[in-house]
Image (cartoon, helix red, strand yellow):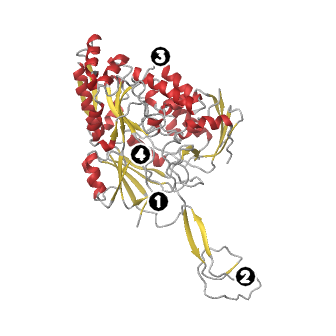
Amino acid sequence: MVFRKTMWLIAIMSLSLSAMLVIACGGETETVTVVETVVVEKVVEKEVEVEKEVEVVKEVEVEVVKEVEVVKEVEAPQTDDRYGGELKVALGAAISTLDVHRTTGTTAYEPSFAVQERMMAYNSDLQATPLLVDTWEVSDDGMQWNFTLRDGIKFHNGVPFNAEHAVKSWERWAERDNYGSLIFGFVDDISVTGDLTFSIDMVEPTALILEALARIGGYAPVMMPPEMYDVPAAEGADVLIGTGPYELDEWATGDHLRVKRYEDYSPADSAASFMAGRKDAFFDTVDYVVIPDSNARVAALEVGQVDLLGRDVPADMVDTLTANPDVRVAIATTSPAREGAWIDNIDGPFTDARVRRAFAMAFPVEDALIAGHGDSRFYTLCPSMMACAGKWGGWADGSEGVYNYHDKGGLEAAQQTIKDLGLVGTDITVLQAGDRARFSGPAEISRQTLEKMGFNVIFKQTDWATQTNWREKPELWDVFHTAGGGAWAANPLLNSSLAKNKYWNKYQDESGAMTAGMESLARASSADEQLAIVKEMQNVFWQDVPYISFGDSFGVGAIRADVQGSQSLYSMSWNVYNAWRSK
């Protein structure tokens, strides 16, 4: 592969997320012994110990072999006892769309993770490595990137994947995603130069092109056929087609979605690592089953009716599941999610930054974290704009007098602000997704806080699938609750809620200071410069309050102990490829 990197590229690559936890994957070895004397005209397929020499009288060259031990690398054999069976994944809410360019909802992402792929993919060190790309090169001045795709890749509908598909899928993503919009500000033109080749001409150089091809968090830059990318992303395509190891088999809306092994899958010729490298579909099928009630999901896992609860294991059930020898529990303490209340920045009272800041001042953030997670093992207060566990989080600059200020005069100050602005009695609509305890509890805290501030709260109780649709329509809500983890919570360039007019809060950045900070961060070439920029962006955050930040949570997942090879890194979905059931 061609990897040409200049010094400017190396310097800026510190913007990548490699400071996060590294979990390396080791290769397997197989020991084989010689079984018999063999004629050297053939390839030795199997060898075991021989107790005597055998003389072969033929006019061919022979070799006598004794007690030879051979150690060779074994990489994902196509036939072994790992193949077969079905994996059942429990979802806490229905899948609202098949198109991950329409929504960032986690339930839609679960099957997409197995069905669709990016051109580049992060390995466990969070390095962007080729997946559907074969080779790439960048000019010495950084003004042109050239990519060649792997040959022989097909979509699940049988159409060969080519450069036109790659470019149009990526452009569709960039129109939707804040990081894509930022990167495309550096791009002059993207040209298809051959069936499997395309080039990117730059307005000015940035080392973030590879990161944009591998993006995690926000909208996913996955590859799609025309049946998907020709449909406006805001509408969402009604099909799910990709190049991944599994293909869509059946979708019964509100009940389940099943994928099956894609027999014509073309895997990457590199070791499996997180989202990168070889992917094997050991399970015949993976069934994503909707079980809204959290207690019912846990019970189904304990008796083996489902195999995996990827997210939102109730805090009060963690110890019970940990004591069960048939279940393995994972707490994501090194990859937190940012919890909060997202507020409508373009319609209603929260268009005024003074009202947003008053809401933040009055908000009892720990009450919301307790309501959503119950146990202090699963959350932490965090005053920084980005997650406290990341390299750009953990300090309080700018948050003084705003964050966690409810019991220090914040509520009274907020009440005065609402009175001075003549907003007492104004209607505020709060959405509550009743089937997601993680968010329904904090919604009740928001209701109570807003009422104490002087608003008349219209409390709309619904389910998660409906909320993910309603949040697209600003006239239907003022406040909803969600969370974002992994890269989204660690890097401001990847955080759609901080980008102007991108996520559902539709932050307007009236001063332009946040947008300018992102552009400067994308150009910064030293760690000290980057840190200074992020700290100034944090001051802007607490002045503008694009959304109400509660703090950080640590997601809990659980999986049947006999399922091997599946894990969750950086708050992404648990992999169902490269996973199998031990016999």
Q: Identify the residue shown where x is 47% and y is 50%.
A: 247
Across and down, in percent, residue 142 comes to 68, 33
Could you tell me which secondary element the residue under label 4 belongs to? helix
Could you tell me which secondary element the residue under label 1 belongs to? loop
Front residue (pair 123, 542)? 542
Residues at marks 4 and 3, CA–CA distance in whole angstroms: 37 Å
Q: Identify the residue shown where x is 45% and y is 38%.
A: 100
Query: Dot 2: few (<14), some (14–19), or many (≥20) neighbours within 10 Å?
Result: some
The three-letter code of the residue at mark 2 reads: Val
Across and down, in percent, residue 491 comes to 49, 34
Could you tell me which secondary element the residue under label 2 belongs to? strand
Which badge, 2 or 4, is on the more N-terminal residue? 2
Which badge, 4 or 3, is on the more N-terminal residue? 4
For label 4, the residue is 110
For label 3, the residue is 511
For label 1, the residue is 282
In the image, residue 525 above or below residue 114: above
Q: Which label belongs to residue 531?
A: none
Query: Dot 1: few (<14), some (14–19), or many (≥20) neighbours within 10 Å?
Result: many
Res. 304 visible in picture: yes
The three-letter code of the residue at mark 3 reads: Ser
The three-letter code of the residue at mark 1 reads: Phe
